[in-house]
Amino acid sequence: MKVMAQVGMVMNLDKCIGCHTCSVTCKQAWTNRDGMEYAWFNNVETRPGLGYPRTYQDQDKWKGGWELNRRGKLVLKQGGRTKRLLSIFSNPVLPEVSDYYEPWTYDYDTLLNSPPTEHTPVATPHSAISGEPMAIRWSANWDDDLGGAAEYGPQDPVIKKIKDHVTDRVKFEFEQAFMFYLPRICEHCLNPACVASCPSGAMYKRSEDGIVLVDQDACRGWRMCVTGCPYKKVYFNHNTGKAEKCTLCYPRIEAGQPTVCSETCVGRLRYLGLFLYDADRVAAAAATPDEKDLYEAQLDLILDPHDPAVQAQARKDGIAEDWIVAATKSPVYKLAKEYRVALPFHPEYRTMPMVWYIPPLSPIVDALRETGHDAEDADNLFGALRSLRIPVEYLAELFTAGDAAPVLRSLDTLSAMRAYMRDVNIGDDPRPELAEAVGLTELRLMELYRLLAVAKYEDRYVIPAAHAEVAQELDDLACSLDGEGGPGQFASPPPRAVSNESFHVMKAVKAERASGSLATSTAVDLPHWDGKGVALGMPKIRSSDD
């Protein structure tokens, strides 16, 4: 057993109001630059819907993630090394700009400098890429709030996957529509397909906290990572010719602060904390034959931070004491492993995603209330879960590879908590049978309520800071997307993002380069995971002659 730490996130979809504050603040912090106008590291989708980019969940088309070959071996869905090498200069399965959207601005000069006229001047849209006039036909949030659902809704890849008799229950007429919001960022997977896809080794997973980053100096713009990521959360900067992606705001994480999207979330729906997991079993878990067993396989990877044996092994594997303490207080561990109300996003992609979701319950309550029923009564809620206007099967395709049982267990637990707390708040005698029905005690149900409803800032974000002995070096060598020449522009090669175990190697390389004893073309193999999802060891130095 090799214990490693992973910074994870849980999002409570019941609390998302679709305000897009997280998207805007992330945009301003990370992608408000030339070449990244179309990119949203954080976006909020309306479900059912096509998503961003359009139909990204259709892996038969986009070839993202992993699959098992005929021998049961885990391989990239986009093909092996030979196939990728043959298509390296012309990748046939890359989303086009139209699949994201062509960013635009307006001809404001017409408004500001127009002479007096009989008619009001119009600011026409112009492409932010080419500068030419354009007709707006799609955007990152075009189908927000089920806009155009009658036309676009049936094209949702998840709708197409579920059975016909279930699809009939999903209605897209205005008066029968059902929707919920789904915020998305990079999943920072345990078995990232983007890392395994990169021919130049520029994508890597940090060993100390599991954050997946791009070495901007090593990236050659092959864009195989864009295809490899099944969530399509790697973007190509057409100005710099480099890949970019969500960094999980690692400079803030290293300082013990939450991500920008978490900090600014209006609904307070995000939780950040540590998972401890067994790195030796990642490849075996990802190769689980039955897709419906992948959720349980991923849960089995997550170790109990309270277990003395796990703590001892974590210390042996170099995890600091304060990180182990933080793992015992982690809200994401509690929601995912202890209460099992949080579920991974599309585990069938076999990437072992580490951004988890609590499925929405509020629309069920609203539907009951509209029909005149007591929306907080446990019996009504439990019955309604099995007859939603948007079926549980849809949620199961999103979160548990089509297995409805874990989704129902999560929703049953949330329903029991809601009904129990309703009795407490109106002065009725609490019913312990509600907690027992979902395998919890009354005390545990109250703890879940406090975590989901009234948790304080320090309870939602339990993030240990980087250690002082490495913080300065990490800061000096950290990845930056803005350079001396302005946003997205570098007067000299940009610094690399590195892990705790490799910063001293990078420091030595920088010192040798400064003294002229090392060739400028020399690069460093940063810690990353190989094609089997196994963590590689210490980095080595390579030169252009290798």
Image (cartoon, rainbow, N blue to C red):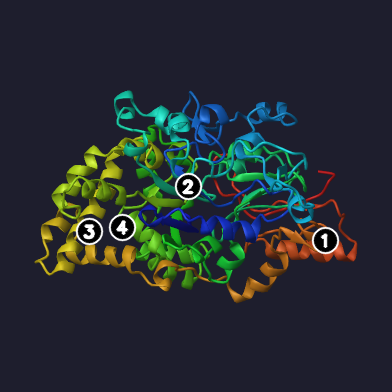
> Mark 3 and mark 2: span between their CA atoms?
27 Å
Q: Which of the two labelled residues, at mark 1 and mark 4, occupies the earlier sequence position?
A: 4
Disc 1 residue type (three-letter): Gly
Q: Position of residue 67 (x, y in %)?
A: 50, 31
Element class at badge 4: helix
| Contact between labelled residues 1 and 2, with CB atoms less than 8 Å apart | no
Residue under pointer 2: 353
Mark 3 or 4, closer to the camera? 3
| Contact between labelled residues 2 and 3, with CB atoms less than 8 Å apart | no
Residue under pointer 4: 338
Q: Which picture quadrant has residue 495? A: bottom right
Q: Which picture quadrant has residue 210? A: bottom right
* Residue that lies at the very extreme toward the right in this rendered image: 516
Element class at badge 3: helix
Disc 3 residue type (three-letter): Met
Element class at badge 1: loop
Disc 4 residue type (three-letter): Glu
Q: Position of residue 20 (x, y in %)?
A: 51, 55
Residue under pointer 1: 485
> Mark 2 and mark 4: span between their CA atoms?
18 Å
